[in-house]
Image (cartoon, grey):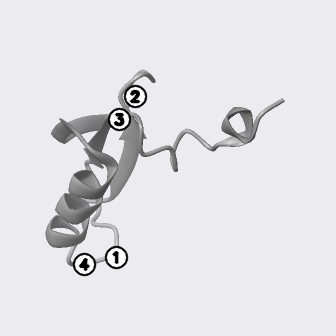
Amino acid sequence: MTNDQYVNPFDDERHDFLALANDAGQFSLWPCFAAVPEGWTAVFGPAGRAACLDHIEAAWTNLTPTAA
């Protein structure tokens, strides 16, 4: 087995990602190959992991969830 088989898909920079948001104003980094979970919407991407994280950092200015 190679080390590539142990890479967490959320850490694997070889894949494209989405930045997701939910109704409570929370954000998540999500790999494009996985279905977007119910209650979440893609708000950025597909793009590289770093670009999606930059978007999340810029957009998620208040870590306190809003009332949904």
In three-dimensional space, the C-alpha distance between marks 4 and 1, rounded to whole angstroms, equals 5 Å
Q: Please indicate whether residue 57 sits to the left or right of residue 65 in the image.
A: left
Q: Is residue 35 above or below residue 51?
A: above
In three-dimensional space, the C-alpha distance between marks 4 and 2, rounded to whole angstroms, equals 22 Å
Location of mark 3 (residue): 39
Q: Nearer the viewer, residue 18 or 37?
A: 18
Q: Position of residue 22 (x, y in %)?
A: 29, 47
In three-dimensional space, the C-alpha distance between marks 3 and 1, rounded to whole angstroms, equals 18 Å
Q: Are marks 1 and 2 in contact (CB under 8 Å)?
A: no
N-term-proximal mark, 1 vs 2 = 2
N-term-proximal mark, 3 vs 1 = 3
Q: Which mark is residue 64?
A: 1
Location of mark 4 (residue): 62
Q: Which mark is residue 38?
A: 2
Using a 10 Å C-alpha cutoff, classify the residue at mark 2 as few (fewer than 14 neighbours), some (14 to 19) or many (20 or more): few
In three-dimensional space, the C-alpha distance between marks 4 and 3, rounded to whole angstroms, equals 19 Å
